[in-house]
Image (tube, rainbow, N blue to C red):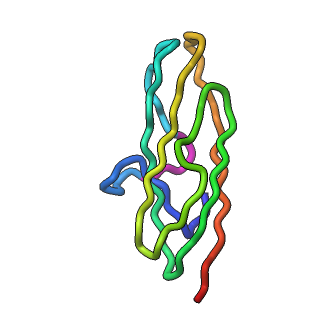
Amino acid sequence: MVSEVKVYSDVEKTKEVVNDVNLGVVKAGETTTKNLFLENKIKFPINYELKLTGTDVALTKFAGRIEPGSTEEIDILFSPELTTMQPITAQLEMKIDYIIT
């Protein structure tokens, strides 16, 4: 992820996401939601766009604006069609634009 935006797996912002997010065990036909928190670490507002690629995963929010020092919550939904004992991988990409006024 970009250094201007930090990604956390908890609202208290103590668990920074660096590479992986563990969604735990999810049975086929069930859905689990993982909350992620994006924090703007610079002094300018930013617009962001997210793209999630992978099997059986979806985002609840694809774009937004984060004011300086503020945090935005996004959710990743995971709904496997088949039960598997293998890790499922997905890739989250983030594009940001600075808003300098």
Q: Main secondary structure of the magenta part?
A: loop
| 3, 34: nearer the viewer | 34
| x and y, in percent, of residue 101 in the image | 58, 89
In percent of the image, x 45 and y 48: which residue is there?
36
Span colored in magenta: 16-20
From the viewer's perspective, tell me whether residue 33 is left or right of residue 93: left
Residue 28 in the image, given as x and y percentages of width and height = 52, 12
| Residue at the image point whose x is 53% and y is 50% from the top | 18
The answer to whether 30 is drawn above or below residue 68 in the figure is above
Q: Residue at x 66, y 50 (%)?
A: 93
The N terminus sits in image quarter: bottom right
> Where 91 falls versus 65 (above or below)?
above
Q: Is 87 part of what is drawn in magenta?
A: no
Most extreme residue toward the left, as rendered? 12
Residue farthest bottom in this picture:
101
Residue 31: image location, x then y, percent: 47, 23
Q: How many marks?
A: 0
At x 59% / y 14%, what residue is drawn? 81
Which of the two residues, 10 or 62, is positioned nearer the viewer here? 62
